């Protein structure tokens, strides 16, 4: 597709369950970013991939959160033992390179609700 | 640690009036600065960015922003607002290098009245 695609667009899960959120970046983009946006807040950085490797995962809130990008394109954000506080919109972005002379494009996000 | 403050949570302007959205940042060196817009049901869209050079930056949709190092500010302006500009606007700061770890402000919601 032409843009960053995130699936599902909405996900409702029960507290304690495991969820996976998928991000399809723009083709050829080597850098991929995950952000979390809680209600009334700006996006909060979670993790950044350059190729297949996580270059910076300092924003992941705890060890229940994990992300992979095994082939350097699609990425999956995995959340174990979900908690109600994990409810937020999870945003993915990608850029051709991580440098500022390119642009990072955002997907429309996955709205996660933990009940 | 880098941080961004957007002091105005909500702003209302009349269509055709000028607009200025405030942004103050905290960063130890010359940062990379961004303004994004988020419309309902839409993803974040980059309006403009500043890395170096001319401190007055032109963006899309008629927006501009001015980097003022002495005030640690990067305010967004538009001379004449259109109803379609109603959205939420986010200022963001990143370390030199680009997008690796960008910190966003809490946003300013813009309402445009006829």
Image: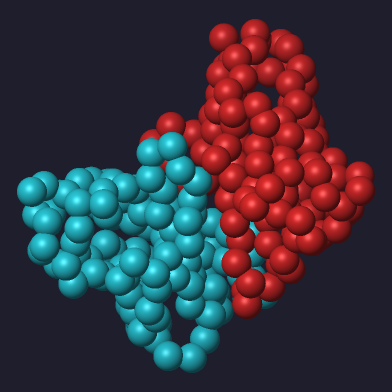
Chain colours: A red, B cyan
Which residue is found at the position 79% from the left and 42% from the top?
A: A75
Image height of A70 relative to A88, above or below: below
Image height of A115 relative to B31, above or below: above
Please state the horizontal and vertical placement of residue B93, each as a whole percent of the image: 51, 65
| Residue B32: quarter of image | bottom right
Q: A67 or A84, which lies in front?
A: A67
Which residue is found at the position 38% from the left and 57% from the top?
A: B5
| Residue A13: quarter of image | top right
Image height of B18 relative to A27, above or below: below
Please state the horizontal and vertical placement of residue B8, each as a whole percent of the image: 25, 52
Please state the horizontal and vertical placement of residue B48, each as a whole percent of the image: 44, 70
* Number of marks in picture: 0
- Left or right of B4 on screen, residue A43: right
Which residue is found at the position 75% from the left and 60% from the top?
A: A29
| Residue A64: quarter of image | top right
Q: Is residue B1 visible?
A: no
């Amino acid at each position: 597709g032409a843009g960053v695609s995130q699936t599902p667009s909405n996900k409702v899960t029960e507290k304690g369950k495991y969820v996976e959120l998928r991000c399809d970046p723009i083709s050829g983009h080597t850098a991929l970013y995950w952000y979390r946006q809680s209600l009334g807040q700006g996006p909060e950085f979670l993790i950044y991939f350059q190729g297949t490797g996580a270059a910076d995962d300092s924003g992941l809130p705890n060890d229940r959160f994990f992300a992979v990008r095994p082939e350097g394109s699609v990425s999956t954000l995995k959340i174990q033992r979900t908690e109600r506080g994990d409810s937020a919109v999870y945003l993915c972005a990608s850029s051709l390179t991580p440098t500022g002379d390119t642009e990072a494009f955002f997907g429309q996000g996955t709205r996660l609700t933990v009940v | 640690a880098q941080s961004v403050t957007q002091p105005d949570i909500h702003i209302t302007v009349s269509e055709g009036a000028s607009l200025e959205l405030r942004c103050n940042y905290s960063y130890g060196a010359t940062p990379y600065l961004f303004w994004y817009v988020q419309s309902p049901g839409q993803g974040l869209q980059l309006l403009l960015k500043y890395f170096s050079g001319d401190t007055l930056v032109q963006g899309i949709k008629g927006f501009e922003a001015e980097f003022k190092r002495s005030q640690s500010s990067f305010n967004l302006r538009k001379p004449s607002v259109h109803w379609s500009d109603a959205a939420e606007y986010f200022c963001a700061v990143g370390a030199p290098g680009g997008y690796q770890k960008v910190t966003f402000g809490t946003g300013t919601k813009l309402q445009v009245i006829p």
